[in-house]
Amino acid sequence: MKLKMIQMMTLLALVVSSAFAADVDLKNSSLTWRGSKVTGKHHGKVPLKSGSVEFKNGKIASGNFVADLSAFTIEDLKGEWAGKFIKHMKSEDFFEVSKYPTAKLKIKSVKKNKAIADLTVKGKTNEVKFDIKETKGVYSGVLKFDRTKFDMIYGSKNFFKSIGDKAIDNEVKVEFSFKLIAKKDK
């Protein structure tokens, strides 16, 4: 308990300083994805492999995150259906995990809690914008992206006009929550 208090005090002192870097506490952070289609929704988790942020004047200024797509899960299906779903998501139709096992997010700037970042999935990079809020040392928000901009067109009405009730929405939502571990002074 005493060690945790010292770590928290160190982190607090760094936040007050003008510039510092911090690593993401991977054990106490989460990414939850949500996708939908005409006939329903699915959700699951994606573990973070790494993450770090840079602070200036007590606010996040930039950051780098790597998500492990090879270990993502689905939480609303079980057994055989869960296995089939994960296998399909990891296939060339979607994330092509055998070739691209990670997704990367590089935060380029944050102004008034509005982040501008580059998201890289399947070797394609596109800019995304999202809000980051901080509550009691936990940073959270929702990042939304259009999967078709990353060559995931399977089931999209934009590409398959007569798909009907088999259509899969293009927007993917990723809810994030992370805590930090003090890294070093700059």
Image (cartoon, helix red, strand yellow):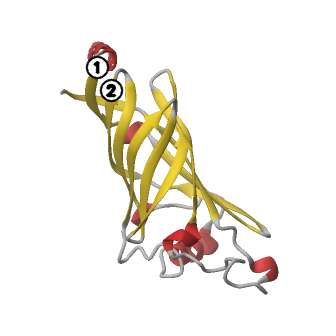
Q: Amino acid at mark 2?
A: Lys
* In contact (CB < 8 Å): disc 2 and disc 1: yes
Q: Estimate the x, y position of residue 49 in percent, counting from the top left.
A: 33, 52
59 horizontally vs 147: left or right = left
Q: Is residue 31 above or below residue 109?
A: below
Quadrant that contains the N terminus: top left
3 horizontally vs 91: left or right = left
Residue 18 bears which disc, if any? 1
Q: Quadrant of residue 186?
A: top left
Residue 36 bears which disc, if any? none
Which residue is located at x 36 percent, y 68 percent?
101
Query: Considering depth in this image, is 57 or 92 the residue closer to the camera?
Result: 57
Which residue is located at x 44 percent, y 49 percent?
117
Q: Estimate the x, y position of residue 146 in percent, counting from the top left.
A: 59, 64
Query: Considering depth in this image, is 163 or 131 the residue closer to the camera?
Result: 131
Q: Is residue 129 above or below residue 11?
A: below
Which residue is located at x 55 percent, y 75 percent?
152
Q: Estimate the x, y position of residue 110 in percent, counting from the top left.
A: 44, 36
Q: Quadrant of residue 123?
A: bottom left
| Earlier residue among tags 2 and 1 | 1
What secondary structure is found at the residue carrying circle 2?
Answer: strand
Q: Is residue 65 above or below residue 172?
A: above
Query: Considering depth in this image, is 18 or 47 the residue closer to the camera?
Result: 18
- The residue beneath circle 2 is 56
Q: Amino acid at mark 1?
A: Ser
Which residue is located at x 81 percent, y 78 percent?
165
Q: Estimate the x, y position of residue 120 in percent, counting from the top left.
A: 41, 62
